[in-house]
Amino acid sequence: MEDFHRFLLVDLNLSRSTANRYRNNVERFFRYVKKKVDEVTREDIREFFLHVKSRAESHKDYLSALKRFFRDYLGLSLMDSFRYPKKNWKVRWVPSKEELKRFYQALPNIRGRAIFLFYATTGLRKMEVLSLRLSDIDFSRRMVIPRKKSSRTKHTFVTFYNEECEKVLMEYLSSRKENSNRLFAISHEKFCEIWRVGYQKTSIKITPRVLRRWFATEMARKGVSIVYIDAFQGRVPQTILAKHYIDFSIENLKKVYEKADLRILT
């Protein structure tokens, strides 16, 4: 398994979290079938998927891991007949500005409010924000440079936060007592409490992922091109035009962001 893990990290250039997940899934498979590698048959794999089929996301994740192991790592054809489950598209709920305001006002302290506004106005992923250091922020330009994380779908550009967020963020940073180089020095329990308290007081289910969705939706509503929204949110450009002919310079991205005039509280 350790060699397979290195194969995922080095040969396939997967992120460490993905490599860890795939290794763990393959280990679970072998604990279930209780066989050596050269004894595994397609029927064993089918039995395993019947066992996990009730959870669609798990099914897909196990399938990816086993394809990486048997097909890519070992060069075997055991997985050739297995297909990914169809993913039904569904409309995702996006909160209104009034719902965002209500949730924000229900938050009990300045740290929770700063974190909320930072997610809503940068469009970043949960762990991208939590991994930020003070040195990753250009406070003079309200610019965020997420810590590097490259894959086939994720990249590192820059994003920004608005004046509303700036005011609350600076208030939080000037009042906090933690001696830390992290932008948000917060435990897992306290982080979860932010979203739990907001939900308990408003019955509105808002999370960092929902705020990321709201950011993309609101930017599009304001006329921002999807290629720039992708850049702010760290997605790799998908078209030749976007990859080679769109201006992704910091100056242009900042101009696009500021022209959108993203607002939540006013």
Image: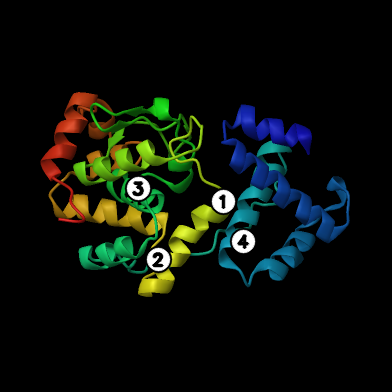
Which residue is pictured at 73% across the width and 36% down the height? 4
Give the structural element (helix, strand or loop) at label 1.
Answer: helix
Residue at which label 4 appears: 58
Q: Earlier in the sequence, mark 1 or mark 4?
A: 4
Quarter holding the N terminus is: top right
Mark 3 or mark 1, which is nearer the start of the sequence? Answer: 3
> Of 258 and 252, which appears nearest the observer?
258
Q: Quadrant of residue 2?
A: top right
Q: Position of residue 114 (x, y in %)?
A: 35, 48
Q: Which residue is mark 1?
A: 188
Image coordinates of residue 56 in percent, x first then y, are 57, 66
Q: Are marks 4 and 2 in contact (CB under 8 Å)?
A: no
Residue type at mark 3? Ala
Label 4 Cα crowd, 10 Å radius (few <14 / some 14-19 / many 20+): some
Callout 2: helix, strand or loop? Answer: helix
Q: Give yes or no for contact between labels 1 and 3 (Cβ–Cβ under 8 Å).
A: no
**N-term-proximal mark, 1 vs 2:** 1
Residue 24 seen in this snapshot: yes
Amino acid at dot 4: Ser
